[in-house]
Each structure stands twice: as C-alpha cells, then as structure tokens.
C-alpha cells in the first residue's frame, strides 16, 4: 500500500517530467536558439537573392553561412540554420554535425579547433541522451507500477537527475560554442545577437527535470525508511 504523500509526489513528478520532455523536444526541433538582427540599411545593401541561393544550394561552409546569418537576420539551432528575411531553413546533416571545426573558419587546411569541435558535438548529442534517459525512466516507472513497488522509483529519480545535467550541459555547450564562434568571426557593426525562445525552453526543462528527480528520490527514500521502521517494529 502506497501512502498518499508518496502517490502525490509521484504524480507531480510525472507531470513535471512530461512537461520537461515536451519543452526539450520542441527546443531540439526548432531553430530559435540564437538569432541575429541586422539594421535595415545593411540588409538593403546586400544581394539577398544571391546570398539566399548560396545559403540553400552552396556547399556547407561555416564561414559562409554564419556571414549570411549576420546579413539576412538569421537564426541558429541545434539542427537548423535559417534566414528570416527569406523564410528559408537548411538542416544540419549528421555528417555535418560531426565535421571538425577550424580556427580559420572555412579553411580545412588550418589548425583544427578541438574545443569548438567537441562543444558542437556535445550540444546536439546531450539533449538526445537526456530524452533517452527520461524515456528509460518512464519505462522503469511503468515497471514499478506493475510490480506495485516504490523501490525502482529510486532509479527513476537518478535517471531524471542525469537527464537534467545533460540538458544543462546542452545549453552551456551551445552558449560557449556561439561565444567562441563570434570571437573568430565577430558580427559586423550594428548586427545584434540575442538568445532565442528555443534556448529558453531548454533552460526551463532543466529545473523541471531536477524537481521531478527530487520528488522521485524523496518518495523512494522516505518509503524505504518507513518500510524499514515498520519491519523492525513487527520483528520487535
């Protein structure tokens, strides 16, 4: 028999976990993690049609696409890069995600920037790991319900804790990668970069996952203590 306090904690933790999963999934699938705003005067002086063609049909080149994002009000995500002026988005393919980054942008003959390379890879792998951990925690939770036991809930809490850390790592890796990118290729004068709503969704999902983990761990540990006390009392 599960105490009402533990049942309430499990229900609230499950709702928080579901909300965090939805927010993180939307964040991963959208492109508004970071956005650039270009003054109208600079946009009018640029050849938008030529830049759009190069953005969509040209070869993948980090220096080229980041300069186009500067000039055409672009947005950058984990899997997408878009230009809002022309309303076109291009996805990063899996081979492109694993492609090394260079200190001289767009020049594969220059020295590889290992820090940016691994930050880029972590920023798109960690959210997938986070979602996988939450899904695994859900399976363990279902098994706990079928077994009518709160013991596996401890594992659910640990999995949500790890998922929250992966989510936080995603945001940190993305912000560090953007900062390093702008050091090698600073935006032109007047171009302003800002955080997008997709990144804020990922930020919101982190505390939700941590609160869900805390509730699951509290329910499992408290129930275990009470069960041990009741067993000791019956033996006595």
Image (spheres, helix red, strand yellow):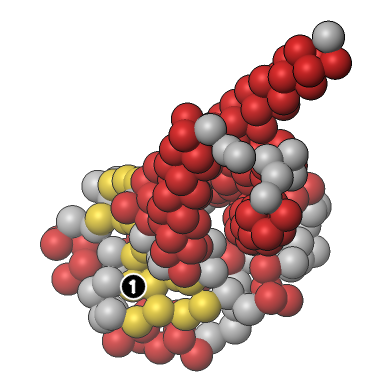
Which quadrant of the figure has residue 176?
Answer: top right
Q: Residue furthest left?
A: 40
Q: Which residue lies furthest to the right in this view?
A: 235
Which quadrant of the figure has residue 96?
Answer: bottom right
Crowd band around label 1 with a 10 angstrom C-alpha radius: few (<14), some (14–19), many (20+) = many
Instruction: Tell me if residue 38 can be seen.
Output: yes
Secondary structure of residue under mark 1:
strand
Q: 151 and 176: which one is in front?
A: 151
x then y, percent, for residue 51: 37, 80
The number of callouts visible is 1
Identified at 24% across, 57% down, the residue is 38
Identified at 53% across, 33% down, the residue is 3
Identified at 66% across, 32% down, the residue is 220
Identified at 34% across, 65% down, the residue is 74
- Left or right of residue 170: residue 109: right
**Above-or-below relation of 40 to 218:** below
x then y, percent, for residue 147: 72, 54
Quarter of the image containing the C terminus? top right
Instruction: Tell me if residue 45 can be seen.
Output: no
- Left or right of residue 108: residue 163: left
- Left or right of residue 23: residue 105: right
Which residue, given by chain and number where applicable, does mark 1 sit on? 83
Q: 40 and 176: which one is in front?
A: 176
x then y, percent, for residue 34: 39, 53
Q: 162 and 167: which one is in front?
A: 162
Quarter of the image containing the N terminus? top right
Q: 211 and 151: which one is in front?
A: 151
């Amino acid at each position: 028999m599960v105490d009402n306090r533990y049942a309430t904690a499990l229900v609230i933790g499950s709702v928080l976990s579901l909300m965090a999963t939805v927010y993180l999934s939307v964040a991963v699938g959208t492109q508004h993690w970071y956005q650039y705003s270009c003054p109208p005067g600079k946009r009018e002086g640029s050849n938008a049609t030529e830049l759009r063609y190069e953005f969509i049909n040209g070869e993948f080149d980090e220096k080229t696409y980041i300069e186009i994002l500067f000039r055409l009000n672009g947005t950058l995500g984990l899997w997408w890069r878009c230009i809002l002026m022309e309303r076109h988005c291009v996805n990063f393919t899996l081979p492109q995600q694993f492609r090394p980054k260079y200190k001289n942008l767009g020049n594969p003959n220059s020295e590889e920037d290992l820090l940016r390379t691994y930050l880029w890879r972590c920023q798109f792998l960690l959210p997938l790991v986070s979602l996988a951990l939450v899904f695994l925690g859900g399976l363990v939770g279902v098994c706990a319900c079928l077994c009518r036991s709160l013991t596996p809930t401890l594992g659910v809490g640990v999995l949500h804790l790890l998922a929250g850390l992966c989510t936080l790592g995603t945001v940190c890796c993305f912000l560090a990668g953007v900062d390093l990118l702008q050091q090698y290729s600073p935006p032109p004068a007047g171009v302003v970069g800002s955080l997008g709503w997709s990144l804020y969704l990922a930020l919101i999902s982190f505390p939700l996952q941590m609160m869900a983990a805390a509730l699951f761990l509290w329910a499992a540990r408290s129930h275990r203590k009470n069960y041990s006390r009741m067993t000791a009392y019956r033996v006595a």
